[in-house]
């Protein structure tokens, strides 16, 4: 959830490019989550020699599974997002971001082996395109995006390409709607040959203005459909992604849409100490105790989303695309809240996406230590939060 775009606090991020990689042949089926070889949290004693962590084995399994899939069922597509993790702090910044730290096959290997089924990649395309027509996205940026997408897919993960932020702003201005559409035309064209079981599009993260959003989402879907007639498209909600945005949402008649909401309630708990939110420092110390009343609030919030679906003439699948809490909050409360939200989502039939994968220092939403120079296999999960998301069987 971002109400104010403040880039001033962003870290100075280094840049780097990867060689273009071919379209991966590995693609999971819509129906089946690829077999997970194990779900053990990877740990290696520092003295052990790390074995190469690549996804060759996973790919072989996924290719077989995909080849037997023939039809697009948007509810099955949504189920493939069952346990998603966001890759924030990588490509959504105006400069290149910390993408090189996550641009390792072994990170995706670890994520996939841990039991996640999908990654949502927030990407700031507007910051890497010409600022005047034809608004071409830079070749070097395509290389960065393709590199992450291909690695994730090779590791059997479904990938969500999420347009996230617009240059130096978190929102699209009314005067920029043509720019938004031209960018989507390029993105859709670029990925049109990627398997639609493995690569989904999300038009924009946390739009603010409902009227502008309803206009440009219709136009954006039409643009995407020219080259991708049935690929799943995720539609976020106005009012910064919150479920309250359902009240104003209008959707075209398109059987390939998934509606996504974000959940950070109570904000005083999840965003305590957030630099980009005015007044968030005075929330420091807020706990979440998991009382019956606190749990009931989550259930009621999610019930309202289910009622919205039931009230529609045509049902549409729901994805909880982001939820998480900042590390400035009490850790035990974070674990309790994360487990409660995850459980409520699963009980309501909403696949979920945790924000965020990489632990970026303090404060962070991240659960995995991506940023060390050690191999990913030696990286560490935040054990409490990890188990809150993927409880041991
Ligand atoms: C924003 C992040 C923010 C997160 C939680 C995301 O959509 O892009 O910057 O940390 O929501 O507020």
Image (tube, helix red, strand yellow):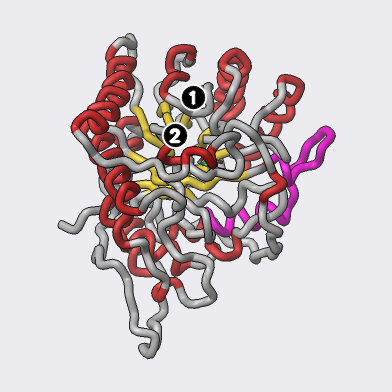
- The magenta segment: 126-149
Write down the quadrant of residue 368 in the picture: bottom left
Question: Between disc 2 and disc 1, whose residue precedes?
Answer: 1
Q: CA distance from mark 2 to mark 1?
A: 17 Å
Q: Residue at x 63, y 33 (%)?
A: 4
Q: Residue at x 30, y 38 (%)?
A: 341
Name, please, the residue furthest toward the left. Answer: 393
Disc number for residue 237:
1
- Left or right of residue 13: residue 55: left
Q: Position of residue 81 (x, y in %)?
A: 35, 42
Q: Position of residue 291 (x, y in %)?
A: 21, 36
Residue closer to the observer: 274 or 263: 274
Q: Position of residue 42 (x, y in %)?
A: 32, 71
Residue 362 magenta: no
Image quadrant containing the C terminus: bottom left
Mark 2 — residue? 267
- Left or right of residue 231: residue 101: right
- Residue 197 visible? The answer is no
């Amino acid at each position: 959830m971002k109400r104010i775009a403040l880039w001033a606090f962003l870290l100075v991020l280094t840049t780097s490019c990867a060689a273009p990689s071919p379209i991966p042949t590995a693609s999971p089926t819509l129906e089946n989550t690829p077999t997970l070889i194990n779900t053990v949290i990877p740990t290696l004693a520092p003295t052990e020699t790390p074995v190469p962590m690549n996804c060759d084995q996973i790919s072989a399994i996924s290719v077989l599974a995909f080849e037997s899939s023939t039809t697009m069922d948007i509810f099955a597509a949504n189920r493939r997002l069952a346990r998603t993790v966001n890759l924030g702090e990588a490509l959504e910044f105006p400069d290149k971001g910390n993408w090189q730290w996550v641009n390792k096959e072994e990170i995706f290997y670890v994520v996939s082996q841990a039991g996640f089924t999908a990654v949502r990649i927030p990407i700031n395309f507007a910051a890497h395109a010409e600022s005047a027509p034809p608004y071409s996205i830079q070749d070097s940026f395509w290389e960065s995006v393709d590199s992450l997408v291909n690695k994730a897919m090779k590791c059997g993960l479904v990938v969500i390409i999420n347009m996230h932020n617009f240059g130096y702003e978190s929102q699209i201005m009314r005067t920029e709607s043509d720019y938004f559409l031209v960018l989507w035309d390029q993105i859709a064209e670029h990925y049109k040959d990627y398997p639609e079981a493995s690569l989904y599009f999300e038009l924009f993260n946390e739009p603010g203005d409902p009227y502008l959003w309803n206009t440009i989402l219709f136009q954006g879907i039409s643009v995407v459909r020219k080259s991708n007639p049935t690929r799943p498209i995720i539609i976020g909600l106005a009012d910064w992604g919150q479920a309250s945005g359902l009240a104003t949402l209008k959707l075209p008649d398109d059987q390939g849409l998934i509606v996504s909401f974000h959940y950070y309630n109570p904000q005083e708990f999840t965003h305590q100490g957030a630099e980009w939110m005015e007044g968030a420092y005075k929330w420091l110390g807020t706990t979440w105790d998991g009382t019956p009343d606190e749990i009931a609030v989550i259930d009621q919030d999610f019930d309202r989303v289910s009622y919205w679906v039931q009230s529609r003439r045509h049902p549409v699948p729901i994805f909880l695309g982001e939820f998480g809490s900042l590390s400035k909050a009490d850790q035990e409360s974070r674990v309790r809240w994360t487990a409660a939200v995850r459980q409520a989502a699963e009980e309501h039939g909403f696949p979920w996406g945790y924000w965020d994968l990489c632990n970026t220092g303090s404060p962070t939403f991240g659960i995995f230590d991506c940023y060390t120079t050690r191999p990913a296999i030696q990286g560490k999960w935040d054990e409490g939060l990890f188990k809150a998301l993927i409880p041991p069987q």
